[in-house]
Amino acid sequence: MVPRSLFKFIKKLDLSYNKIGFLDPDWVPVLFDKLNTLVLNHNTVSSISTGSFSSTPNLKYLDLSSNHLRILSNPVFQELKALEILLLYNNQITHIDSGAFGGLHKLQKLYLSRNSIAHFPIELYTGRMKLPELTLLDMSYNQLHMVPVQQISIAPAWQLSGIYLHGNPFACECSFNSMLNFWYHRHFSPVVDFKNEYTCFLQPDSKISTKLPLIQDTFMNCSDSTINSSFHAFGFVYEAQVGTRLVVHCDSKIIDTSTHFIWVSPDSRLLDPESRMSNFQVFYNGSLEIKEAQYENSGVYSCIAMNRRKLLNETIDIRITVSNFTMGRSHAQEAFNTAFTTLAACVVSIILVLLYLYLTPCRCRCRSRRQPKKQGPSSAHSSILSATPPHEAPAERKSSTGKRVVFLDPVKEPMHGQNGKVRLFPNDHLIAESILKPNRMKPDTDSISSVFSDAPFMAPV
């Protein structure tokens, strides 16, 4: 039990090496609004209730290491708005809720080593629960088998340079190896200081498995594309099209308010926020802007970050490639575009043919049906002059009724006996002769006018 006689104006309280078993809203007797350091290590704390730190709202340093904590539910530390350092190492933690550290906007260092955590808390770096000022995360000696490389690459270098992951039973993976090698070449302290403690297992779940060092250049014959994708993910390779605007960030690990930036172009020109150039501009946060990218802007740019307060500097090389989209397209893209265009043309052609076949009105049937009812001038004239109609007409009408030819090529015949006419049915001589050979009499103008005139007929006297 915490003694009730404690002076409420104290600034540091050390209760280590006792038998405090749990924390609830009443475990502190009075409001310690001046308390900034609370040490509770080497106790028997197994659970923390919501509101347990409502009596200590101004804590900056909290040590809960070497206890019996198993689960961190959310929200647990939400009252500690000013907390900067939280020690939870050497517990029995197996699960951390996504909002367990929600509200700790001032937290800078979080120690979670020597627990039984199996999942990397990526919510500390992404999403609405991320900790914007977190510079150190110690996840060493847990039960991590993998790390979300693509998601963690979103974090800036000043956060990544403080992630400690050594001593975990990682599975051997090319992307993770590429990330660790990348951190090693950038001289991040977690991988430089503990290089030999980054190992992996070919079969993590097996009792007998091969153990390999993770930080090495030739690792499991990993392809160069995996390494290059990591450089893309961490912002060290940029691609742009001609005429587009490109903004390149200087992702330095020593960025703060006292950091000054200078860029060196491929042609050895110095670019800083004070310089004025037509196509380049350097912002005070270290970003470089190329207003209209051109071919000659391609090359390796160097960003020099100088921290005057910490007396540190860092040089970062970034490669920029400017190309034309139409010229840089791959053969696979061109083949796909050609195949897609051909397929679209075929579909349109089929639709047009179907529209022609099924939506065009059939004039043949209409004529065949209307022909007995309506007679043309020539047929009327022949009915007057001829007593018996020709016998070939019904045969002709019967053979042509109901037939429809979409595409018909004319067939040429010898000149004799055809008068230059086109023969439609080569094997049917009778039909052709009945069409082309009958002698049609010269129409009589008077008889035609008497038949088709609207005036009343006057018989001659």
Image: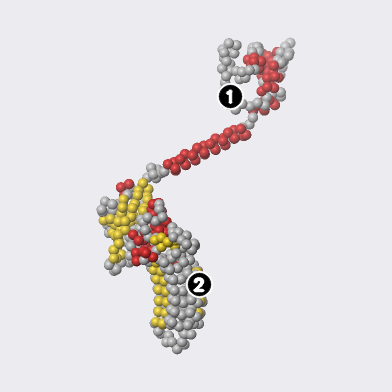
Q: Which residue position is annotated with label 1?
A: 408
Element type at mark 1: loop
Q: Residues within 10 Å of mark 2 (few under 14, many from 20)?
A: some
Picture quadrant where residue 251 is located? bottom left
Residue at the image position 30 percent from the left and 62 percent from the top: 314
82 over 242 or under it: above or below: below
* Quadrant where the C terminus is found in the figure: top right
Q: Which residue position is annotated with label 2?
A: 71
Q: Is residue 429 left or right of residue 460?
A: left
Total marks shown come to 2
Residue 346 percent coordinates (x, y): 53, 36
Q: Is residue 9 left or right of residue 310?
A: right
Residue at the image position 41 percent from the left and 66 percent from the top: 167
Near-viewer residue (138 or 247): 138
Q: Is residue 433 visible?
A: yes
Near-viewer residue (119 or 322): 119
331 over 163 or under it: above or below: above
